[in-house]
Image: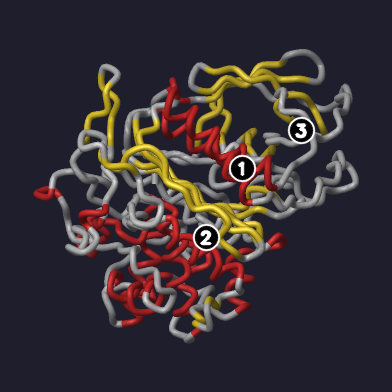
Amino acid sequence: MARPLIRAALAALALSAATAPLLAAPAATTVAPAELAGFVDGIVAEQIAAREVAGAVVTVVQNGRVVLNRGYGFADVASGVPVDATRSLFRPGSVSKLITWTALMQQIERGRVDLDADVNRYLDFTIPPFEGKPIRVRDLFTHSVGMSDAPGIITRDPAKLLTFRDWMKRNIPRRLWAPGTEIAYSNYGAALAGYIVAQVSGEEFDPYVERHILGPLKMDSTSFREPLRPALAPRMTKGYRLEKGRFVEQPPELISAIAPAGAATSNGPDMARFIRMLLGKGTLDGQQVLKPESVRFLLADGLSNAPGLPGMAHGFFVFRQQGPRLVGHGGNTADFHSILVLAPDANSGFFISATGGVGSYGARTELADLLVAKLFPDTPMARQPRPADEPQPAGSFRANRRNYDAPVRPEYDATVATAGADALTVTMENKASHWERVGPLLYERVTATGRAGPFERLRFVEGPAGWRLVLGTQPHMAWHQVQP
């Protein structure tokens, strides 16, 4: 939904002979539940004290079992109601998309949807082609639809809320480049996946998901419906803003106009069941919602904006390629900040959701990073001197994921400056970071994290339109040079 996620521990793809090799990452670590609980308790206690977190839930699956499910802070600050790890509900934002991709895969399994078909085959309205090239279903999975970002997807005013079908037909984003060529995260594209599910199944999206995914998985506390049904509504954690040092409750966010892209409500135990289904190759407690080959497709590499850096799987972000491979998705609404990380080779994963002030967004990311470092420690890459004939691109870079019909906001551009022959300074949102060369046009951020990670990497890619900057933590977008 809102801006991207995780500065999690990342490693490069298997690289060409011309690229610096990645040091072998340690194997995934099994942490005793008591140790893990103490580790997370300490981090979140500090975040509640200093990172504007009002309430949070953290759920960890190791070796296919739930080993941690804990609630922190308050579900209702004013009334003093604490977060209940088994009952309190959160908005996972774009983590909802993983359920949508599951639904679309079910329709592909049934032969109702062809991966390489023009999406218009399944719609009751028309997405205009770009230079004669239609968007394929496959392009939805890799967020490579080549569209402007869709604004206005969340409201708090019920009077301004359109139905899902009406919103989709009235808000087709502008086509900008050929589909299947470059990743730029698209809420509209993900919602289109849910629209196709409704069209080909003959069921509206919300009841379809309940009948074919949530019901079989016994995810009884999860819903895409707005408002929530009466049995769930009292369990909803409040959304907050921090005003003059105090948490101020916000009116509920309404996301149903683009429901498949981020309207879910859920809790820790339900998201653990979803994680366990994926780790179980589509089956949980004897209930199969996907075939094993469908899960393999969802988690397998799809498209990348830069060789040697993680890209998109199919609906899932690739956070790290090895040591072990990490995939998943982050999600941000205005009020809630969430992430789901999956380590299929380690039969493990976790889910986090938090609410509070603006700082709770960073707290979610910080906690995810620390959990990755604890459970899946990483290693840095060896530094390499830059040959004299290798360029060091510099200047201003602008994200390809944005609303192209809105005025340009240069203050959101990234600025790259040389910092010696083998290093760079990158400034984003007035925060500078230092990067050192680890391979051809490949740099690693310098931190004091030692050998556990996380280690962020960036690569420059040269194309017909100039240089692009791609960050390992942002597999869903790229930055184009706008000023040398």
How many numbered marks appear? 3
According to the picture, the residue beneath numbered tag 2 turns out to be 315
Residue most extreme to the front:
34
Colour option used: secondary structure
According to the picture, the residue beneath numbered tag 1 turns out to be 371
According to the picture, the residue beneath numbered tag 3 turns out to be 441
| x and y, in percent, of residue 195 in the image | 33, 68
Q: Are marks 1 and 2 in contact (CB under 8 Å)?
A: no
Label whose residue precedes the other's in the sequence (2 or 3): 2
Marks 2 and 3 sit apart, C-alpha to C-alpha, by 28 Å
Up-down: is 442 above or below 413?
below
Up-down: is 464 above or below 129?
above
Residue most extreme to the left:
159
Name which residue lies at 20% across and 37% down.
79
Q: Are marks 2 and 3 in contact (CB under 8 Å)?
A: no
Q: Does 450 sit left or right of 394 as displayed?
A: right
- Of the residues tagged 2 and 3, which is closer to the observer? 2
Marks 1 and 2 sit apart, C-alpha to C-alpha, by 23 Å
Q: Does 366 sit left or right of 170 as displayed?
A: right
Asked where in the image residue 227 lies, by quadrant, the reply is bottom left
- Amino acid type at circle 1 is Leu
Q: Residue 444 carries which label?
A: none
Up-down: is 309 above or below 260?
above
| x and y, in percent, of residue 57 in the image | 43, 46
Q: Does 27 sit left or right of 376 as displayed?
A: right
